Image: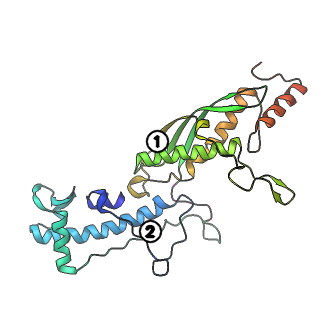
Amino acid sequence: AIVAEVLGVDLERVHVQRVDSDVSPIDIGSYSSRVTFMMGNAARRAAEDLKAQLLRAASHRTGHPVEQLEVAYERIQVRHRPEVGVTFMEALHAAMERAGALTATGAYSSPPMGGSFKGARAGTAPAYSFGAYVAEVAVDPETGLYRAEKMWAAFDCGRPLNRLAVEGQVEGSIHMALGQVMGESMNYRGARLLNPSLLEYKIPAPAQMPEIEVLLVGDDDPEGPFGAKEAGEGPLIAALPAMGNAIYDAVGVRCYELPITPDRIVRGIEDRRKEGRAWKGA
């Protein structure tokens, strides 16, 4: 999407090719929610390089200087005379006639942050996402069973480059968070793992998912590609305390470890009664 936006072409023209790690430039990996920000900036710079080559070719074809040209949809045209211009393919062919196959590269390194001492940059980032979530739960104080009824998720990822994908990422992150809250755990007896497969590792079923309302908020980030930040791991975090606080608000039991299982809720309610503190909803 970033490359297509820079070049003014249809998204179907852009293809991501598989590469061989033996011959491709080194990269430290796809993690830490860095792909949109780091690779997006690099892809934009490569596209800007290619765009400059096409503008020069279009300049020769139209007789107008590069400074007067602009990219439109599948077209390069004169800014003050949009009827004068060439198609994207005409500009591409003209550029290839002069230089052969066109190649462009782009790289991005985040600006210097932190101090000058060793390790000063650890944990720093050029941009941070933010989230504010509200959870509504229903809790049975007799059994400790509970259910997430609805989740409101306000998330700041800068400009969402693909709104549908970002909303899906937020919903998927909430599913992961509910798994951590409701049942995911690795249970050991001594050194033996008692639940070694996904049959015993409890993740939420589709029927256990709440209604989710995603609100994408925030402003464009000045360092991100077209103002984008991240929507990778960030959307998961706020859902965890939102669920814990909702359960506390319902039955007055504060849990300090995950998962929050029904037996822990019942035990917390019993402890409150022993201390002479009635259940909050009584």
**Stretch in magenta:** 122-127
Image quadrant for the C terminus? top right
Label ID, residue 108:
2
Is residue 195 visible in the rendered image? The answer is yes
Q: CA distance from mark 1 to mark 2?
A: 26 Å
Which quadrant of the figure has residue 148? Answer: top right
Image quadrant for the N terminus? bottom left
Report the mark closest to the observer, 1 or 2: 1
Which residue bears the numbered disc 1?
216
In the rendered view, does 197 fall on the left or right side of 98?
right
**How far across and down, in percent of the image, does residue 29 sit?**
54, 68
Which quadrant of the figure has residue 96? Answer: bottom left
- Residue at the image position 55 percent from the left and 46 percent from the top: 172
| Between 97 and 112, the one nearer to me in the picture | 97
Residue 204 sits above or below residue 189 on the image: above
Please name the amino acid that badge 2 sits on. Answer: Tyr
- Residue at the image position 84 percent from the left and 33 percent from the top: 267
The mark nearer the N terminus, 1 or 2, is 2
Which of the colour schemes (rainbow, by chain, secondary structure, one colour) is used?
Answer: rainbow
**How far across and down, in percent of the image, does residue 162 sit?**
40, 50
Residue that extends furthest to the front in the rendered view of this protein: 199
**Is the C-beta separation of discs 1 and 2 under 8 Å?**
no
| Between 206 and 172, the one nearer to me in the picture | 206
Please name the amino acid that badge 1 sits on. Answer: Leu
**How far across and down, in percent of the image, does residue 21 sit?**
49, 77
- Residue at the image position 69 percent from the left and 46 percent from the top: 202
Instruction: Categorize mark 1 by other alpha carbons within 10 Å: few (<14), some (14-19), many (20+).
Output: some
Q: Mark 1 falls on what kind of element?
A: strand
Q: Mark 2 falls on what kind of element?
A: loop
